[in-house]
Image (cartoon, rainbow, N blue to C red):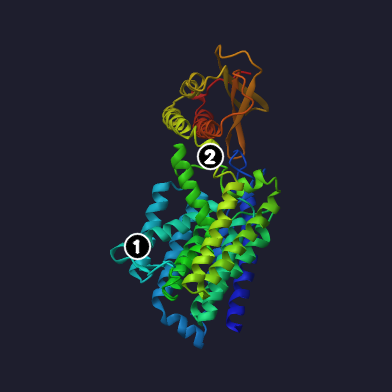
Amino acid sequence: MITFFVAFLVSLMVALGLTFVVRNQALAWGLLDQSNSSRKVHVRPIPRLGGIGIVAGFFAPLCALFLVDSGVGHHFRSHTDLISGLFTGGAAIAALGLYDDLRGAGARLKFSVQFIVALGLYHLGFRIEVIANPFGPELSLGALSLPFTVLWMVGVINALNLIDGLDGLAGGVAFFGVSTNFILALVRGDVLLCLVMAALAGAILGFLVFNFNPASIFMGDTGSMFLGFVLAAVAIKTSTKSGTTVAMLVPVMALGLPIMDTLLAVVRRSLLGRPLFSADKEHIHHRVMSRMVLSHRSTVLVLYALCGLFMLTALGLNFANSVQSAMLLCGMGVVIAVLMRKLGYLDLGRASDMQQRRQRNIRLRSLVKDVIGAVREARSLQEVWGAVRVLAEVLDVSRQELRFQQLRDGLMDGVVFETQRAAGLSMPYELCLEVKDEEVVLGSLLLVWRDGRNAIDRDEELALELVADAVAERAARLLAVADADPARVVVLRR
């Protein structure tokens, strides 16, 4: 126990110190998560590189074991498969997350790296070969072991990434998963897994000091994907050392909240015709906040309590027989069903217009893709306007305005493009989106409806935000070229 406590303390102190340093440096260098989107919950720019502290805090005590001549150190170094998997795979996932936080990584790159890492772990012996069945004999996967293991790894990595939507939520969820694995490893006398989980627990708590609401730094993809990777890998080791009655059920239940949220997101977006990897505000934490009318901090605490329930169920499954396991799962199923109904996921009244919304969203996605493509090919602000002008007719807008502004010699110059249509006589409803490059406001995109609406459809709002982001990206380049080459300056008039 002393070794575990020392590992926990070292990781805690390293994570505390490094997160503090990273936060201050990110503020100085402007490496911030902007709040210029309705998809964001925070209202001010926040540093997003806190995952560096988690990664360093986790590896610090484990690396120290290579330098310490002790029984635990020798035992640790003798397990080359565990060391290779955690160090190599963890470094690759952390590097991917850091690149995404700094430069932005597309879905193709993310999944390519994640699948390669998962295949590498499978080669090292991290394999899921049995699926538990408390209602009968266990199911041997056989040839399906490889795809199931890979999907588990990739799924959990992205599940932790998706749940990272509120201050302290992803870190807290991961901590409950770590606690479950630590207790199970301790009961079995598995020193190595106890050591790994103690190190990760210290790193998470050190980071949460700065991340709990109100957060002063976010973990970013560096932290969320790394946490998902370690928990997924340890879960495989936990399942292989459990009885076949509960193999994989315990880790699935321990990570119940992020897994449930991910499955709901996939089903929801598929039914509504949205891109699977698009951002929205319909995750479990968003709905708890809105439907239960809770504050940011209260929402996180409620979800912590739910994670605690999942944790107790996972521990119960580990010690229960087949009949008791079945009863626990049925009871948890009832709790989940009640929660889903409370949050509106089982609202049958919305099912009738599901197909209509799906078809409309598919058309909207095609439109946005064409508009963004045209914006990126534009060679002038006039062509940018020509690309986005088609939105007015397709979205039945009565007035559309695209405004650019630029500070020159102490004066604010600007140009305004505008189109109007006869589209209703009701009171106007306006949506104004900032065209913003990082912290620099380049202008705005204004749309006005007169069809009697008093709110905009959420899918349309998300689509327009993507268009505004593309306009900002292209306008920033065009204005930068104009500043660099006086011969190509676009005259902007107030």
Q: CA distance from mark 2 to mark 1?
A: 41 Å
Q: Could you say where residue 99 lies in the image, as x and y percent from the top left?
A: 48, 53
Closest to the observer: 488 or 245? 245
Residue 209 vertical placement versus 165 (above, below): below
Q: Could you say where residue 410 lies in the image, as x and y percent from the top left?
A: 68, 28
User: Which-is-in-front pick, marks 2 and 1?
Assistant: 2
Looking at the rendered structure, the kind of residue marked 2 is Leu
* Residue 210 located left or right of residue 132: right
Q: Report which quarter residue 180 is drawn in.
A: bottom right
- Res 119 label: 1
Task: Please tell me which residue is depicted at 56% across the width and 11% down the height of the picture.
Answer: 422
Task: Please tell me which residue is depicted at 61% across the width and 79% down the height of the picture.
Answer: 6
Residue 62 vertical placement versus 230 (above, below): below
Q: Could you say where residue 321 lies in the image, as x and y percent from the top left?
A: 48, 74
Crowd around label 2: few <14 · some 14–19 · many ≥20 (10 Å): few
Give the mark, 2 or 1, whose residue is nearer the N terminus.
1
- Res 483 label: none
* Residue 302 located left or right of residue 100: right
Q: Is label 1 in a helix, a strand or a loop? A: helix
Quarter of the image for the C terminus: give it. Answer: top right
Identify the residue position indicated by label 2 in the image: 348
Q: Is residue 214 visible?
A: no
Q: Report which quarter residue 205 is drawn in.
A: bottom right
Crowd around label 1: few <14 · some 14–19 · many ≥20 (10 Å): some
Q: Is label 2 in a helix, a strand or a loop? A: helix
Quarter of the image for the N terminus: give it. Answer: bottom right
Looking at the rendered structure, the kind of residue marked 1 is Leu
Q: CB under 8 Å between callouts 2 and 1? A: no
